[in-house]
Structures are given as structure tokens and as C-alpha cells.
């Protein structure tokens, strides 16, 4: 290493001195440790008297039995699949409080909740677009989206299911299913049809439970 100035030389000398001091301290600590262990050994021999080491040639070493790994992640995945087992045949009318503007509120909530949701009282924090997904894909994606949004502490999200303009008969295929799926999710408190600027008849604005509830 080239030293270009006296200051650099002093700096290098300081580093070397520190390194030497550290090595010396480490050697001294190891020496003191050896002395202590030797002293403890002598004290033990003085306390118990003469000893004779046990023969080791008959010692049996039992092989360790490995513990089979617990498929924890697979269990979590399977539990998640069970949670997302949302039925397409669910009778929405048994739980929905519906009106002509397509809104839902969980039993026990007042109409002011859907009114505030429709008026934009809660800001939309995240959205999912289910366009182009098959039914099974949409079901899984929606379940995962709602669960993760609730885990993150989000309160208001938007679900775009489409207006069905490109479907046979121009009928929204996912719309009815999304309604059924959402009312089966325990994280969902209410939802309303989105305002025109937010997707109108092709989307829903969903209110989620606060975390911990």
C-alpha cells in the first residue's frame, strides 16, 4: 500500500497499532481462560480425590431420530383454500339488505353506512379488476384480495367485475357471483354500486371491518 502523506502514514500506523493491540488482548484472554480452566480442574481433583476415567469402548451411541418436518406452509395454504371455498349457489336474499341501487349492509348496521359509502365518506384505498378472469380464478383472486386488504388495515376498496358488454348476451357473468362471494366474506361489512366515475354498474365499493374485529 502506497502512503502519499504523513497524515496517511500516521493513520496506517494507528490502524496497525489497534490491530496488534486487539490480537494481543485476544491472546491474553485465551491464556487467562486456560489458566482458569486448569485451576478449576485442580480444585475439582483436590475435592473429589483420585479418579479413574471410565472405559469408553463399550459406550453405545444411539443414532438421533430426525423429526419429520411439519408442513406448516402447506397447512396454511390449505386453510386459505378452505376459507376461499365460496359458493356460487349461495342464496344472497337470505342475508342481503338490498335496495334498487344495489347495496348491502351486514345485519346490525344502519342505512347510514351504505349512504356514507355511496357518498364517498371512505376513500378508496385499493382496487382489483376481475376482467378477463375465469370464474375460479376470479373467486380465488377476490378472496385473496379481500383477506390481504383487511390484514393491511384497509377500510374501503373497489372491486371491478365488469358490465358484461363483451359477454354472450351482453350479460355480466361475474357480477352476480361477486355479490354472492362478498356476502360470504367475514371481512366485508357493506358494499354499494360504484359511482359513475369509479366504474358505475361495473364495480362495487366495499367497506371492510377494522383490523381486530
Image (cartoon, rainbow, N blue to C red):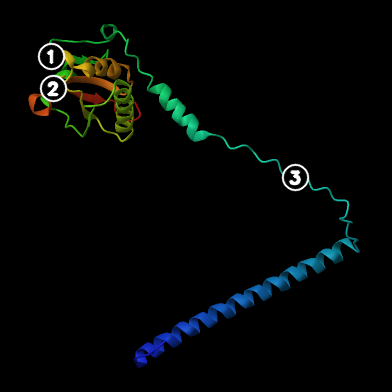
Q: Which residue is mark 3?
A: 63
Task: Specify few, some or many for label 1: CA neighbours under 10 Å numbering under 14, 14-19, or 20 or more.
Answer: few
**In the image, residue 100 above or below residue 13:** above
The answer to whether residue 157 of the structure is visible from this angle is yes
Q: Residue at x 45, y 88 (%)?
A: 13
Q: Position of residue 115 (x, y in %)?
A: 13, 19
Find the distance from the CA under tag 1 to the CA under tag 2.
10 Å
Q: Residue 23: where, in percent of width, then height?
A: 57, 78
Can residue 102 be seen here?
no
Q: Which residue is mark 2?
A: 118
Q: In the image shown, does 49 or 201 lie closer to the viewer?
A: 201
Q: Are marks 1 and 2 in contact (CB under 8 Å)?
A: yes
Give the spatial CA distance, label 3 vs label 2. Answer: 68 Å
Q: Secondary structure at mark 2?
A: helix
Q: Residue at x 49, y 81 (%)?
A: 18
Q: Nearer the viewer, residue 9 or 29?
A: 9
The residue tagged with tag 1: helix, strand or loop? loop
Which circle, 1 or 2, is nearer the viewer?
A: 1
Amino acid at each position: 500500500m502506497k502512503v502519499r502523506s504523513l497524515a496517511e502514514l500516521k493513520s496506517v500506523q494507528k490502524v496497525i497499532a489497534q490491530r496488534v493491540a486487539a490480537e494481543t488482548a485476544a491472546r491474553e484472554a485465551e491464556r487467562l481462560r486456560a489458566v482458569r480452566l486448569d485451576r478449576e480442574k485442580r480444585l475439582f481433583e483436590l475435592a473429589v480425590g483420585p479418579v479413574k476415567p471410565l472405559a469408553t469402548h463399550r459406550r453405545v451411541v444411539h443414532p438421533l431420530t430426525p423429526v419429520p418436518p411439519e408442513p406448516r406452509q402447506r397447512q396454511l395454504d390449505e386453510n386459505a383454500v378452505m376459507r376461499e371455498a365460496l359458493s356460487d349457489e349461495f342464496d344472497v336474499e337470505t342475508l342481503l339488505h338490498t335496495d334498487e341501487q344495489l347495496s348491502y349492509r351486514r345485519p346490525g348496521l344502519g342505512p347510514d353506512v351504505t349512504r356514507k359509502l355511496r357518498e364517498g365518506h371512505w376513500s378508496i384505498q385499493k382496487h382489483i379488476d376481475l376482467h378477463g378472469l375465469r370464474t375460479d380464478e376470479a373467486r380465488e383472486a377476490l378472496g385473496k384480495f379481500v383477506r390481504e386488504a383487511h390484514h393491511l388495515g384497509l377500510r374501503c376498496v373497489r372491486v371491478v367485475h365488469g358490465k358484461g358488454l363483451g359477454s354472450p348476451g351482453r350479460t355480466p357473468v361475474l357480477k352476480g357471483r361477486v355479490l354472492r362471494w362478498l356476502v360470504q366474506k367475514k371481512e366485508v361489512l357493506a358494499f354499494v354500486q360504484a359511482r359513475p366515475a369509479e366504474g358505475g354498474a361495473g364495480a362495487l365499493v366495499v367497506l371492510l371491518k377494522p383490523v381486530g374485529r
